[in-house]
Amino acid sequence: MKKYILLTSLTLAAILSLTALPSLAEATRPQVEVITPLEYDFSPTVSVSGRVEEKSRAEITLPMPAVPKQLFFEVGDTVSPGDVLASLDPDAAREVLLSYASRYADLLPSLSLPEELQTALTSGNAEAFLKQIPFPKALIATAGGTLTSLSLQEGVLSFPGTPAAVLSDLSELRLRLTVPESNAGVLAPGQSLLFTVSALKEGLFSGTVTQVLPTAHRKLNGLSYETVVDVFASIDDDFNVLRPGYSVRAEITAGETETLSLLPYEAILQDPDGTEYVYVFENGFAHRRNIKTGRELSTSAAVASGLSPYETVVSDGSSIQKDGPVRLKKPAS
């Protein structure tokens, strides 16, 4: 009797083990999450920096060294053409120049002085020659606008060469952007852009490229020089918060919009020889599929070939090692 009981127990154990095999096999399958490629409309852009500036401005320079007697306007004032910005004292200018020349004769050639004035100051009778030179008695506005810069100080000698005053038309602002020479070839008038302003914590502004200058120049960038091209852009709306001199960062749309089929980098694996592949999921199985990627974004890459936009792939390719059955992770409740 005991023999029959033992035989029955062994039979039951065998049956139970056979029924448990599918569950054990299921438990040993890699657990994965799956995704489909994300369709994304992408417009290539060029990142640039620059500043806000007035579209129209007039710089007024002194024809001769001058000593301002009285200033009649301040920065921010509105000026009309012909307005006297400052009265100048010719006698004071001659006196200060004579004193300057006697102490700093070796510096005279480096100053932006008219040739006749250089000759007079280096002659044996500088005082007599200076009296024959007509020094200006006033600084006159040659244009109208807002006075945005005034370098004159009453009683202080000012030299020609740099603007004594700047008059700006603030009714229309624009952007002056510097573009690395490697990107200049893809830019053209009519391209749209978005930009932010360093002085403003919030706000996104839009504009349009109006001109790409035909020449390049070198610009100091940190500790080295780089070759850049200047680009001008109009501003769609400044919302009365932009000012000349503000620094900006802009993204210029520089190409046709294309639809990308994106996968996260975690889904894309690579052989030592550089062959890229993913694991495609189908009917409970994962199998390797070689692909080629194209444009790379910050967190994903575009699939250029080898995969249909509607196929499902394992989201983390490193979670499995070879083709075979897999099981899907249950979504968190």
Image: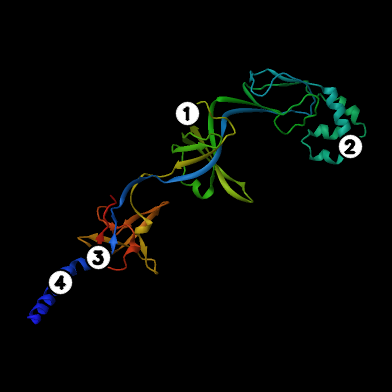
Label 4 neighbourhood size at 10 Å, few (<14), some (14-19), many (20+)?
A: few
The residue at which mark 1 appears reads as 237
Question: Residue at 87% of width from left, 35% of height from top?
Answer: 101
Q: Quadrant of residue 283?
A: bottom left
Q: Quadrant of residue 52?
A: top right
Judge depth for marks 1 and 4 and give the one in front: 4
Q: Nearer the viewer, residue 68 or 13?
A: 13
Q: Determine the residue located farthest toward the front in the rendered image.
A: 1
Q: Which tag, 4 or 2, sits closer to the chain's start?
A: 4
Q: Which tag, 2 or 1, sits closer to the chain's start?
A: 2
Q: Quadrant of residue 319?
A: bottom left
**x, y (%) of residue 19?**
15, 68
Callout 3 secondary element: helix
Callout 1 secondary element: loop
Question: Residue at 85% of width from left, 30% of height from top?
Answer: 97
Is 42 on the left or on the right of 30, as rendered? right
- Tell me if label 1 and label 4 are in contact, CB under 8 Å: no
